[in-house]
Image (cartoon, helix red, strand yellow):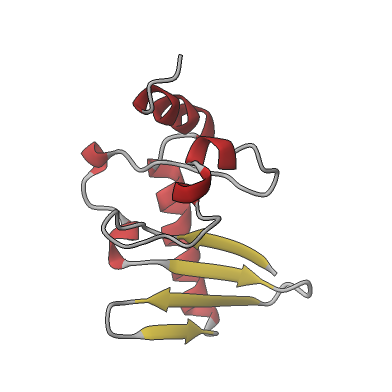
Amino acid sequence: MEDSSTDTYDSAKPEPSGSLRTFGAVECMTLRNVEVQVMPLHRGVHPGLDGPMRLLETPDNQWFGYCEGQESSQFITDPQTISTLYMRYAKLLSQALTPEDTRGLLTRMRGAP
């Protein structure tokens, strides 16, 4: 399954070993199956603020969605709802920095040349 995840990370909670924070986001970006894009703060309200969502596609092109909230989670199979989630995901990608700009920002933030 292809996993198009939009996870948000809270700096106050511990991260599992191997996470972006433990491994280092810039180093993680060298992996062939990882793409990191930062959402600039000046964008304000965006679809990612509603919490993590995952879009999954099976080898036979069947789509599923999974959304999490603080007190609930939802497994989604309805094609119309999946379409809405996919549009939100596309909006997130369009508002975020490109992977190249993200790499530059993260490199500057950690003080590397």
Q: Position of residue 66 (x, y in %)?
A: 48, 77
Question: At 44% from the left edge and 48% from the top edge, which residue is drawn?
Answer: 21
Viewer-closest of 113 and 17: 17
Give the tally of numbered discs: 0
Q: Position of residue 95 (x, y in %)?
A: 38, 42
The picture places residue 34, in percent across and down from the top left corner, at 61, 47
Give the quadrant of the N terminus: bottom right
User: Would residue 42 be found to the left or right of residue 48 on screen?
Assistant: left
Which residue is farthest top?
Answer: 113
Q: Is residue 95 left or right of residue 86?
A: left
Q: Quadrant of residue 51?
A: bottom left
Find residue 85 and report its image quarter: bottom left
Q: Residue at x 49, y 41 (%)?
A: 25
Image location (x, y in percent) of residue 102: 45, 33
Above or below, 2 against 66 in this view is above
The residue nearer to you, when weighing 33 against 64, is 33
Which residue is farthest right? 60
Left or right of 11 in this view: 19: right
Residue at image coords 35%, 43%? 39
Q: Is residue 52 above or below residue 92?
A: below
Q: Is residue 111 left or right of residue 62?
A: left
Identity of the residue drawn at 31% across and 77% down: 69
Closer-to-camera residue (109/4): 109
